[in-house]
Structure formats: structure tokens, C-alpha cells
Image (cartoon, helix red, strand yellow):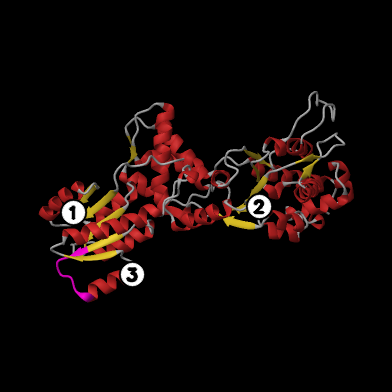
């Protein structure tokens, strides 16, 4: 999801004086800026919600929304963008008040061109310095929270430590894991990912550690396994919280000894991989309930990175929406280039329970249905409504089935846990753990 890089820095110019607006536009374009000029604060806010800017230059005293109020509104959606204010009525108190509230700079009119150039260069340096490098080129963000995560990710990428990425489903955990791999010394070796909740226990073990020919029915050839496939590189274990306990023991042993033993083989194989794992679950709670090993947790969680939800990084929504729109339009070869202003405002204000994954689905639906180059508001409303009941992940679907299955099983056996365990083909201890996981009490079924 990489945003197309712009050849010129993007500047939003706001002033109710039309003649000054034209003069500054000519000067700034001569300095190499791509200038978008508007005459009032409300128009500026619409542009902020629909376009990407590196810096804002605004008059302080304007009818309606003044410069300081505009700054406050911008900070509500784009905390990272530098804002410079100008005024013909400049006073020390104005400048102090503006800078105390976080305004990047303050200029008095008539604006000194050299002073403006210097201030803009400083603002631009700050704005561009916040952008991730090529190692994270697929992560579109201007969010201070997200940029802080990327800063930590880059620093730990250089060290051979295990990383646990936490965050809600759809926040981009695999994307971050891949970025860490690209920033590491292992970047020229494979990045291999597997969802630990997507496979039954026996298949997951075989996928991870490999198997010998004839190890089980259907094993007509040997399988090297993902540990060896990722040799020298990075193995990403997504939804590690869903890994069965018996496999957790084997994974811990592999990490401690840096060796694996394929299923059905008596030989151990040396491994050289970096482990990055991820989960949407609260592993502290899982450890308390006995469904996740504490020793494995501390082996995996040398460094923890928590990804913010999309709602918590709402300043990224316009960037992501435009990037996804461009990619989808190219992929489907359709002529659609932007969202209408009111459509973009709705995207920014929405709750996004499904995070970036839900935004991807919304954009895809809009591209599939639009008949104009500009995506209208009603299509965004329709797509948002359709994705509120978003398709569950495999892990979510499995958990939902598991809960219904246990409920029916306990009802059939009148709450007899031993009998329920026998019917399920599990032992009594496993059955109690599953019941605790889904908050089921045998007494409720007697």
C-alpha cells in the first residue's frame, strides 16, 4: 500500500487577500513548491481532508475560521503537518500564543521572502524526516503514533532479537513484520509467514518443522518445512496466541536449541531464523488461563510493538484511501482518480472496527461500483454499511464455531464435562480450558 511519491513538496496556502494569494503562489511555485491556494479556513479544511500536504502557510486574521482555529482543526486530523501563520497585525503576544499551541512558525506581513524561504525549508525538513524509508515503503503513514512505532521497528531491526507485534485484527501486523525484515541484515534472505490459527495442529506442526517421507498418510514426499524455508531470514508467526499448547512446547525447544526435528524423522536440523510473532489476543490473560506458556511468551516478547487502530491514526485515512484507490483503479483498469470532498470526510469520521482491512474492502467496493472518475458520497455510505458486518477472519470464524460446538455438546450431555470430553475426542483438562476460554459453566447446562 505504498503512496506514489510526489516530485514537488505540497504546500497549502490560505489567505483571504486574493492579490497576496496570487503573489505568494507565484513566488512559492518559483521556489519549487506545488501550491494549492484557498481563500478561507473552511476550504482549507476540505483540502486537508482530501489531499496530502507537507506544510500549511496561512493568514492569522481571516473572517470565519481564523488561522489559530484552522491550526487547531488541522491538529485534530493531521498532527504531523507543520503550520506557519502570517499576520499584518503581528504582535509578540500573537506569536507567543501561536507557538505555545504548537504552531511551527510565525511571520509578519509584509512577508520577508528570505525569512519565509528559511522557515519553509525547516518545516519541510521536519515533514519529510518523519517519512519512513524504502524499508517501510509499503506502509503509508503520517501519524505520529505510527511513525513512533516505525522508529522503534527500525532500531530493533538491526538487532537479533525476537519481536512480538500486538494490535487488533486488520491493523497491518504482517506488513510491519515484513518491514522489520527489510530493515534487518537478513533482508536478502526469505521472509516466510504463516497463520498459526489457520491450520489444524498436525498440519501446523508439519508446515513449521517439515516431515519425512511416509511420516503419515499422504506424506508421499518429504517436506522441508517453513523453518528451513526461512533459513537465514525471518519467520513470521501470525496469531501466535492460537498455537496449541503441545506445539508451543516444541516451538520453545526449537528456539532454545536452534534445532528442529521434522515429523517422522530421528534427525535434528540446525536452524538460523529470526522470529517475529503477532497476536490480536491479550497474552497475559491467556497465560493466566493456562492457554499460553509463560516461558514461550518471554522468549518471543523480547521487544513488543503495539500497532494503533486505524481510528487512532485517523490522519492516515486520506493517505491510505487515495493510495488504495490508485492501486485498485490501476489493477481493474478503470478511470477513477479521487473521492469527493464529502465522501472523504465520511471516511475520516468513520469508526473502522475492521481497521485497514475494512478500508481496503470499502475502497475495492467503491472502485467496482463507481461510474465516474470521482467516487461519490453514496457509494462510500453503501460500502461502509456492507462492511460493518465484515467477513470474519479464519481465527474468528473458528472461535465462533468452537463456542457453538461446546454449547451444543454441554447441552447434549447435561453439563457432564467428562462425557462431553469423550464425545469431542479431548481429555477432561482440555475441555475445562476450552470452556474457560469461551466462558462456559457446566452448571448452566444441568
**Which residue corresponds to mark 2?**
162
Q: Are there few (<14), some (14-19), or many (20+) residues within 10 Å of tag 1?
A: some
SS at circle 2: loop
Q: Secondary structure at mark 1?
A: loop
Query: Is 141 positioned to the left or the right of 353 in the image?
Result: left
Query: Up-down: is 160 above or below 222?
Result: below
Q: x and y percent of residue 5 in the render?
A: 37, 41
Residues at discs 3 and 2 in contact (Cβ within 8 Å): no
Query: In the rendered image of this protein, does residue 191 appear above or below residue 438?
Result: above
Q: Is residue 76 left or right of residue 280?
A: left
Which residue is nearer to you in this view: 176 or 359? 176
Q: What residue do we see at 73% from left, 44% from top?
A: 402
State which region is magenta: 86-92
Q: Label 3, on which residue?
A: 101
- Residue 39, disc: 1
Residue at (54%, 55%) from the top-left corner? 155
Query: Quick one: label 1 or label 3, which is nearer the N terminus?
Result: 1
Amino acid at each position: 500500500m505504498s503512496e506514489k511519491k510526489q516530485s514537488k513538496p505540497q504546500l497549502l496556502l490560505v489567505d483571504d487577500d486574493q492579490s497576496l494569494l496570487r503573489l505568494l503562489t507565484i513566488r512559492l511555485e518559483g521556489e519549487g513548491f506545488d501550491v494549492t491556494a484557498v481563500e478561507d479556513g473552511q476550504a482549507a479544511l476540505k483540502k486537508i481532508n482530501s489531499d496530502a500536504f507537507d506544510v500549511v502557510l496561512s493568514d492569522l486574521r481571516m473572517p470565519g475560521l481564523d488561522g489559530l482555529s484552522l491550526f487547531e482543526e488541522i491538529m485534530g486530523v493531521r498532527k504531523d503537518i507543520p503550520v506557519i501563520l502570517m499576520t499584518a497585525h503581528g504582535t509578540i503576544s500573537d506569536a507567543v500564543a501561536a507557538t505555545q499551541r504548537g504552531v511551527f512558525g510565525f511571520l509578519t506581513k509584509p512577508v520577508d521572502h528570505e525569512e519565509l524561504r528559511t522557515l519553509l525549508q525547516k518545516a519541510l525538513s521536519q515533514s519529510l524526516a518523519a517519512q519512513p524509508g524504502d524499508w517501510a515503503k509499503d506502509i503509508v503513514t503520517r501519524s505520529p503514533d505510527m511513525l513512533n512505532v516505525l522508529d522503534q521497528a527500525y532500531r530493533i531491526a538491526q538487532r537479533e532479537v525476537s519481536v512480538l507485534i500486538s494490535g487488533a485484527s486488520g491493523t497491518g501486523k504482517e506488513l510491519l513484520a515484513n518491514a522489520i525484515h527489510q530493515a534487518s541484515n537478513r533482508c536478502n534472505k526469505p521472509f516466510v509467514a504463516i497463520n498459526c490459527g489457520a491450520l489444524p495442529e498436525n498440519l501446523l506442526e508439519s508446515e513449521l518443522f517439515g516431515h519425512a517421507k511416509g511420516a503419515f498418510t499422504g506424506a508421499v514426499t518429504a517436506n522441508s518445512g517453513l523453518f528451513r524455508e526461512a533459513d537465514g531470514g525471518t519467520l513470521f508467526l501470525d496469531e501466535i496466541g492460537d498455537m496449541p499448547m503441545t506445539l508451543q512446547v516444541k516451538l520453545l525447544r526449537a528456539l532454545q536449541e536452534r534445532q528442529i526435528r521434522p515429523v517422522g524423522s530421528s534427525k535434528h536440523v540446525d536452524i538460523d531464523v529470526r522470529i517475529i510473532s503477532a497476536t490480536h489476543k491479550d497474552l497475559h490473560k491467556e497465560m493466566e488461563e493456562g492457554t499460553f506458556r509463560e516461558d514461550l511468551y518471554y522468549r518471543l516478547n523480547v521487544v513488543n510493538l503495539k500497532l494503533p487502530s486505524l481510528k487512532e491514526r485517523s490522519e492516515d485515512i486520506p493517505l491510505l484511501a487515495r493510495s488504495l484507490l490508485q492501486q485498485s483503479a490501476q489493477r481493474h483498469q478503470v478511470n477513477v482518480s479521487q473521492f469527493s470532498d464529502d465522501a472523504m470526510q465520511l471516511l475520516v469520521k468513520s469508526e473502522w472496527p475492521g481497521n485497514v482491512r475494512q478500508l481496503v474492502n470499502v475502497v475495492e467496493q467503491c472502485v467496482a461500483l463507481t461510474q465516474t472518475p470521482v467516487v461519490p458520497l453514496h457509494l462510500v455510505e453503501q460500502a461502509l454499511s456492507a462492511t460493518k458486518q465484515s467477513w470474519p477472519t479464519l481465527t474468528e470464524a473458528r472461535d465462533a464455531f468452537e463456542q457453538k460446538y461446546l454449547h451444543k455438546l454441554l447441552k447434549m450431555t447435561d453439563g457432564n464435562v467428562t462425557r462431553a470430553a469423550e464425545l469431542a475426542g479431548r481429555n477432561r483438562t482440555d475441555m475445562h480450558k476450552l470452556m474457560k476460554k469461551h466462558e462456559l459453566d457446566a452448571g448452566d447446562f444441568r
